[in-house]
């Protein structure tokens, strides 16, 4: 899939200078920064991404590396905090690392992308779904290997309208870029479809008592709840709603799809609905990759393991195809070509978003498993 890509004269000149810096810094191994939470309440999402990156690097290095060099992961923590996004990005730049898989959370990603683009660092996020990562930015070094909330939100809303057909819906969110953005998309599409959204409200992430909003769900006779945010808050909402006798069914985005939600919600998690990337681990074409995960006692079935593998593979293929570790040349090659990865044929539009990505609806179970909704 050929696309046109043109560097401005200033960027081209910077690219030459930076290419010399990167090539000198990477004389031994080619370093890839893996940026995401290693601390804080959603470290599990960072773990998913690192498992994907580590497995990809091991497979690529075992096959001879990239242009005769080995890949090396450098883990950098941003705590999933927007204010830490620029701090982590500057650590990448100061270490003269030209390639990033991450950030993991949308807020931290949005806060970091301008630094990467200005400094000529290729960043591929496997998990940040907010449209604000790329919309209207005219970035040339920023990519993702996951779909956007304005794809995921409408997919969730269509499912709710077609399959659930609720009478009275509440849409909640955590007041953050990711959660509020996807919740708003779901609300808008539900209302367009004729479904009443009687409660649209933000909660404070990190709180331990959501009884006030749960009382509001009861008093409004809500029979379905969509929550935009992450698993710690969703787990509490599920548990506390069950304790107060709320019978509504709950649904969320991929941010709630974490096994740790079971310990928070208990039996109340049974039947939770969520949108996730398609279960790429079930694709027979990925059998060898899945085995590589399993041989290291890693789980290939989470939301971000295989999107992170794909991000790492795309960077490696870009370096190989460009025959260079100059990020400007690699970015140009990524924009101009498509790649076969565990998530399928991977290609990007001008602003670095995937030209195609599939979200599916799953049912979550109290034993930590999930099944595709049928």
Image: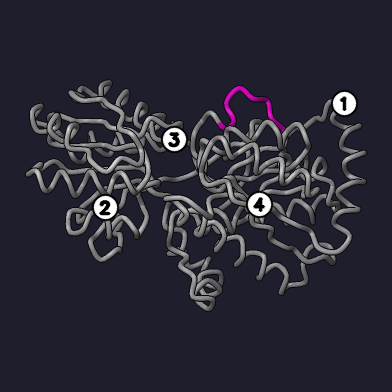
Mark drawn on residue 10? 1
Q: Residue 208: x percent and y percent?
A: 27, 43
Q: Is residue 134 magenta?
A: yes
Mark sitting earlier along the chain (2/4): 4
Q: Please, is residue 165 above or below residue 66 in the view?
A: above
* Mark 1, secondary structure of its residue: helix
Q: Is residue 35 magenta?
A: no
Mark sitting earlier along the chain (1/2): 1
Residue 235 shown left or right of residue 239 in the figure: right
Q: Please, is residue 351 above or below residue 230 in the view?
A: above
Q: Residue 265: x percent and y percent?
A: 23, 54
Q: Residue 187: x percent and y percent?
A: 30, 26
**Mark 2 — residue?**
373
* Mark 2, secondary structure of its residue: loop
Mark sitting earlier along the chain (1/3): 1
> CA gap, disc 1 to disc 4?
28 Å
Are dots 1 and 2 in contact, CB under 8 Å?
A: no
**Mark 4 — residue?**
339
**Mark 3 — residue?**
178
Name the residue rendered at 28%, 21% in the picture: 192
Are dots 2 and 4 in contact, CB under 8 Å?
A: no
Pick the front one: 84 or 140: 84
Pick the front one: 286 or 18: 18
Name the residue rendered at 31%, 42% in the picture: 252
């Amino acid at each position: 899939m050929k696309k046109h890509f043109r560097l401005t004269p200033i960027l081209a000149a910077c690219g030459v200078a930076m290419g010399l810096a990167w090539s000198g810094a990477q004389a031994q191994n080619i370093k890839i920064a893996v940026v995401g939470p290693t601390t804080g309440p959603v470290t599990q999402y960072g773990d998913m991404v690192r498992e994907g990156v580590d497995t990809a690097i091991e497979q690529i290095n075992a096959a001879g590396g990239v242009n005769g060099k080995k890949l090396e992961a450098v883990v950098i923590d941003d705590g999933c905090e927007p204010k830490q996004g620029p701090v982590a990005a500057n650590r990448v730049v100061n270490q003269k690392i030209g390639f990033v898989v991450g950030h993991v959370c949308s807020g931290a990603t949005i806060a970091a992308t301008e630094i990467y683009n200005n400094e000529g660092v290729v960043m591929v996020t496997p998990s940040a779904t907010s449209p604000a990562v790329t919309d209207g930015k005219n970035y040339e070094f920023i990519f993702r290997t996951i779909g956007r909330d304005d794809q995921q939100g409408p997919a969730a809303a269509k499912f709710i309208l077609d399959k659930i057909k609720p009478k009275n819906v509440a849409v909640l969110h955590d007041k953050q870029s990711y959660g509020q953005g996807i919740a708003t998309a779901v609300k808008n599409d539900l209302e367009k479809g004729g479904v009443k959204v009687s409660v649209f409200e933000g909660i404070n992430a990190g709180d331990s008592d959501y009884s006030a909003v749960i009382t509001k769900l009861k008093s409004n006779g809500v029979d379905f709840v969509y929550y935009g945010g992450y698993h710690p808050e969703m787990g509490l909402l599920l548990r506390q709603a069950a304790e107060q006798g709320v019978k509504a069914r709950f649904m969320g985005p991929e941010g709630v799809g974490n096994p740790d939600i079971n310990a928070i919600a208990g039996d109340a998690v049974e039947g939770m609905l969520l949108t996730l990337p398609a279960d790429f681990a079930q694709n027979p074409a990925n059998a060898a990759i899945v085995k590589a995960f399993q041989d290291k006692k890693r789980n290939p079935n989470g939301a971000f393991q295989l999107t992170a593998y794909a991000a790492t593979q795309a960077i490696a293929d870009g370096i190989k195809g460009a025959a260079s570790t100059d990020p400007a040349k690699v970015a140009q090659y990524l924009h101009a070509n498509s790649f076969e990865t565990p998530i399928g044929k991977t290609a990007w539009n001008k602003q670095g978003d995937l030209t195609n990505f599939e979200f599916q609806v799953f049912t979550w179970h109290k034993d930590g498993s999930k099944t595709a909704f049928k």
